[in-house]
Image (cartoon, rainbow, N blue to C red):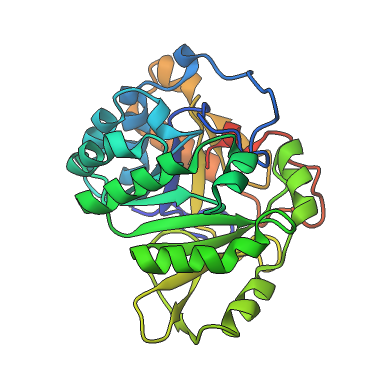
Amino acid sequence: MSLIDKYNREIRYLRVSVTDRCDLRCFYCMPKGFDGYEEPEDWLSYAEIERIIASFTRLGVNAVRITGGEPLVRKNLPELVSRLSALPGLDDLSLSTNATRLGKHAQELYDAGISRINVSLDTVDPVKFNEITQGKLEKITQGLLKAKEVGLDPIKINMVIMKGVNDDDVEDMVEFCMQNDFTLRFIETMPVGDTGRNAANYFIDLHEIEKRLAQKYELIPAVMKGAGPARYVQVAGTDFKIGFITPISQHFCDTCNRVRLSATGTLYMCLGDEHKYDLRPLIRKGISDDELDQVIRDAINLKPLKHEFNENPEKVVRFMSMTGG
């Protein structure tokens, strides 16, 4: 079966947030001093998450990424991973994390069925890292090395580029990732909520970063496994790949293949739009599997043709950690 929206895009990828909480405070993601988290009883249970994802896989989705907030803040996450990895038709189960707790959980996540991870890391300068996140870089590097040790592969580093904040760290991050066999992906800032709109003041077109790197490295086109929108190049003579995610300078809406499920069961069709469908009330009222499948089909038709980050940056009022990474 296939899940196809009204613009004839096939939806194959679901990003699932298991919590809106995080143990870092990246200024472009979460408002300073924010404590308006959802209550844990409002989160979907693991059984409810499994049931919704089973519906998506029946409809043709084959790639799922577990996100947050910080997903490892939620207890017993490997239990959910084990349940999801057993679902028929789910070929790609991955995790996005800030790596603060990865040193403790990498082995059990790998054993439960996570094969690859994305790690948010915007600088390898400890002082600057603390300024951006209010956290300690040492915990992240320890987590990354443990993930590499247990066999998680590939490990992709996601770096949000911000003018005057970390744009001078690009070459250092390239060298760090090359030395450790990590894949590096640069991401443009997006106006998601007030925090994101503030960070948009630091926007840099990633084509500028690519041109800069091309002066130092020979870059050749490359491809890499994954369900997301990154465009990749490779440093000639190495296996090292760099990805560019450009939702502002060169959006990829016409090939968008994904939707997002929040920790409270809200299905968001587009990161840059407020269209949503609340699945939790239906699940808790006892909707049948056939009815759930049909609800998801109906919800997918709310997916807009494209985001309006450029034309209408005030449109999205929720901030990133509420939506899911």
The answer to whether residue 253 shows anywhere in this view is no
Residue at 41% in and 54% down: 12
- The answer to which of 249 and 210 lies nearer the viewer is 210
The answer to whether residue 21 shows anywhere in this view is yes
Q: Where is residue 56 shown, x and y percent of the image? A: 37, 42
- The answer to which of 201 and 47 lies nearer the viewer is 201
Q: Residue lying at the far front in this picture: please name it.
A: 127
Residue at 52% in and 60% down: 9
- Left or right of residue 126: residue 310: right
Residue at 46% in and 20% down: 43
Is residue 80 shown above or below 236? above
Q: Where is residue 271 shown, x and y percent of the image? A: 62, 46
- The answer to which of 189 and 176 lies nearer the viewer is 176
- Left or right of residue 304: residue 243: left
- The answer to which of 48 and 211 lies nearer the viewer is 211
The quadrant where residue 275 appears: top right
The quadrant where residue 248 appears: bottom right
What is the tally of numbered marks visible in this picture?
0
Is residue 179 shown above or below 82? below
Q: Where is residue 42 shown, x and y percent of the image? A: 49, 16
Q: Where is residue 128 shown, x and y percent of the image? A: 62, 47
Residue at 63% in and 18% down: 35
